[in-house]
Image: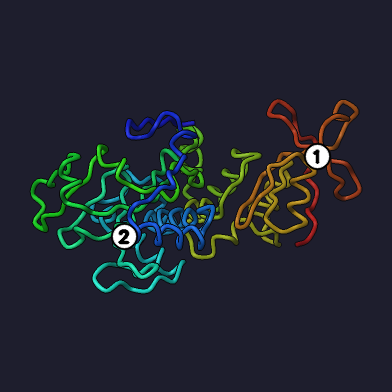
Amino acid sequence: MSTYHDDTLPIDIAAASVIATRIEDEEIRRVREHLLALDPAGTKFAEVLRNTIDQILDGENTGRYDWRQLHKTEKTHAGTLVEINLQRKFDFNGGQDMDYEIAGADVDCKFSQDLGGWMIPPEAMGEICLVVWANDQASRWSAGLLRADREKLTRNGLVTRKGNRDHKYRLNKSNLHLVTWLWKMQPLKENLLLHLDDQTRQALYSPKSGQKRVNELFRRVQRKRIDRNVVRTLAQQHDYMARVRDDRNRTRARPALRQEGYIIVGDSRNHQAVAQALGGPVPERGEFVSFRVGKAQPQHEDRPSVELDGCRWVALHSNEKADHPAPMLPSR
């Protein structure tokens, strides 16, 4: 597992998640209440950020999985995509002068992968900014509201970005206490390829064939939820789901790996029931989980098991050999 350290991240995440409810700015209070009513737990917001990062990486066409692989212009474009995708998700009206109109207030949307590193243009001074941060290495995201008050920001260390022709201002860590947080230090769905160890990731990318890369994924990454975007990135083709499909093509992941003792469960109810019976994890919408299984033996009596093809099956440990082909999974 790769490690990541960022000095901008609070050490005590639980304490950092506490959000003050005393808000003196009436417009910010209204906007905050409206957004929390639309998305109380921030699940929709988190989904937009995960999907936007994946959209920018464009794994299907590029095979990329890491923000650091992006070109500078692509990183710059990320803020625009976050703004557009949030508007589509929440159906915000366009603002009079800023990006959105929310609860009767003009709101400008600002995104950064650096916590506190938002760029504020002169025309946004005095306005409300929806400041959004997401970091794929840390698997965390935050969003809050900031009144871009020039006097307060300058007093707290606002700096002008050198060489910026638009004269935008860049915030820094000393400004974070001015943000009224909506959601802070929330988990961002893990980018699996980014967080695999280097040896495993190299093995996944070594085959020239997209089908072989997908097969290697389900062979090496067991008992972990695998998002279909990972399959898309490794397959690098439009009909990427065909790489997993159980059909007459024996090279597909399910029929090919079945001969080696693997089952690949999807997000249908029948498949989820199999994963649950084997002790999980259980795939959620758009996910897969690979299990290497064997017929239950007396020594497995305390191990979770499932009945398939008239036999009891258990998930095998890494030091156990699969002596039989895996069973067929129930239909969707």
Is residue 47 rendered to the left or right of residue 57? Answer: right
The local crowd at label 2, few if under 14, some if 14 to 19, many if 20 or more residues have their Cα within 10 Å, is: many
289 lies above or below 126: above
Residue 85 can be seen in this image: yes
37 lies above or below 258: below
- Which image quarter is the C terminus in? bottom right
Query: Going 91% across and 28% down the picture, which residue do you hit?
Result: 298
Q: Which mark is residue 121?
A: none
Q: Residue 109 carries which label?
A: 2
- Camera-near label (1 vs 2) is 2
Q: Which amino acid does label 2 sit on?
A: Cys
Query: Going 17% across and 63% down the picture, which residue do you hit?
Result: 123
The local crowd at label 1, few if under 14, some if 14 to 19, many if 20 or more residues have their Cα within 10 Å, is: some
Q: Nearer the viewer, residue 116 or 101?
A: 101
Element type where label 1 sits in the image: loop
User: How far apart are labels 1 and 2 at the CA level?
Assistant: 56 Å
The residue under label 1 is 324
Query: Going 48% across and 32% down the picture, which residue do you hit?
Result: 197
Q: Quadrant of residue 95?
A: bottom left
Is residue 91 rendered to the left or right of residue 71? Answer: right
Q: Which of marks 1 and 2 is nearer the N terminus?
A: 2
> x, y percentage for residue 67?
35, 46
> x, y percentage for residue 209?
50, 51
Element type where label 2 sits in the image: strand
